[in-house]
Amino acid sequence: MAFRLTDDLIAGHNSKAAGWLEDDYAHLGRQLARRGVEIERLTERAMAFRVAVPSWGVGTGGTRFARFAGPGEPRDVFEKLDDCEAIHELVRVTPGISLHIPWDEPEDAAALREFAAKRGLFFDSMNSNTFQDQPGQKLSYKFGSLTHTDPAVRRQAVEHNVHCIELGRKLGARSHTVWIGDGGNFPGQVHFRRALERYLESLRAIYAALPDGFRMFIEHKLYEPAFYSTVLNDWGVSYHCTRELGPKAFSLVDLGHHAPNVNIEMIVARLIQFGKLAGFHFNDSKYGDDDLDAGSIKPFQLFLVFHELVQAELEGVAGFDPAYMLDQSHNVTDPIESLMTSAMELVRAYVQAHLVDRAALAEAQERNDALVALQALKQAFTTDVAPILAMARKRAGGAIDPLGTYRASGYRQRKAEKRPATGRVQAGIV
Ligand SMILES: [Mn+2]
């Protein structure tokens, strides 16, 4: 039997912290009540939050320079799901798993679906991979995939995406995410307009394969692996393409896929307004597509993004149904620890956004009182909502202190004994 984190183990660890949690929660409840906020309403929101974990995120990531493998890394999709289960057991907001094909290609889709369901997990968005060549692949993606100049290469890439959708249907997924590495390194290498035409032609073929109720997400990125130009370079092009494709196509925002200093929260607001926000790949960055842990570098930006999301939620914007996923590369940390921490940072930003005094904000906006408007946001952002997050986890059966409980459990050491390094682990950055 594989070692698993049990409810007893978590409850045992929780009993040591239950006293201070009750104290802190009661104190914060009184503070918020003075501001006219009911703490239980926020705790309910924290318990309802969900974010999907990427299967590729539980393996140690790397850069183009090196990858330093960690101990006890999962060796196949089943071991990846074991790690995803451990994350969800502790934080209780991550039952969804985003798979990457062909890295996670199962021999038997029904068996994989059952394996996940037994652990309380399900499959979220599917992800195709036409940014690298696979062993035995007939045609190379070195010069592109869905936008390649050779129609045979485009056809192969379309077929792979259709396969991902078909597999996703068997696994119970409801959406398919397409990110391509297509682009150029040299001025003149790519005919910009023709490449985008080829992209749309390929995407139309993939779109036609979507089953009822399935959505397609397209993910833009301004550079890397192509360093001069990419085909789907920004949200404007992405929006145009989703409009061209139809009502089942949406634009996905990966926080790391924008130029430095771009106002991402405003892009989010625009996509919400235009009814085309697919959802997110959450991560954080300092310089580019760094794939650092969500909330580790720019927590205020993350809060402002959630401010837009919660505003849309509260206003009941028609069709607003964003999918949340993490997409990070854990190069120097235990991936389970990073994914837990990042999921908790998202819940924090979500709860803080629910704390914004929206009546005061709206009034300040009407009066053009810039400082009071900022204050409404800052008051929410600077409120320490940690007791709410901990209480939400405890009530859902998770850990008051996920990191401490995980380390005390010896999970990683136990897995390291059972999972000797193979050197074959694939961890990607997309
Ligand atoms: Mn991404």
Image: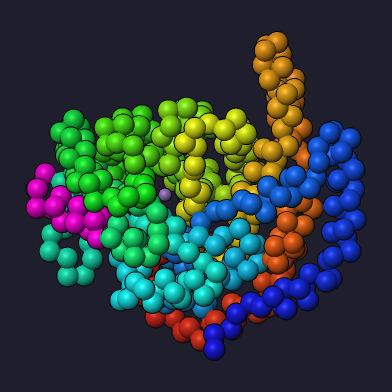
Picture quadrant where residue 417 is located: bottom right
Picture quadrant where residue 240 is located: top left
Picture quadrant where residue 380 is located: top right
Counting from the top left corner in percent of width and height, residue 278 is at 43, 42
Residue range of the region highlighted in magenta in the rendering: 149-164
Q: Residue furthest front?
A: 212
Q: Nearer the viewer, residue 222 or 185?
A: 222
Q: Nearer the viewer, residue 315 or 9?
A: 315
Quadrant of image for the N terminus: bottom right
Q: Residue at x 18, y 35 (%)?
A: 197
Tell me if residue 136 is in the magenta stretch. Answer: no
Q: Is residue 341 visible?
A: yes
Tell me if residue 159 is in the magenta stretch. Answer: yes
Q: Residue at x 52, y 45 (%)?
A: 285
In the figure, is residue 401 to the left or right of 81? right
Counting from the top left corner in percent of width and height, residue 249 is at 34, 40
In the figure, is residue 303 to the left or right of 277? right
Magenta-highlighted stretch: main secondary structure? helix
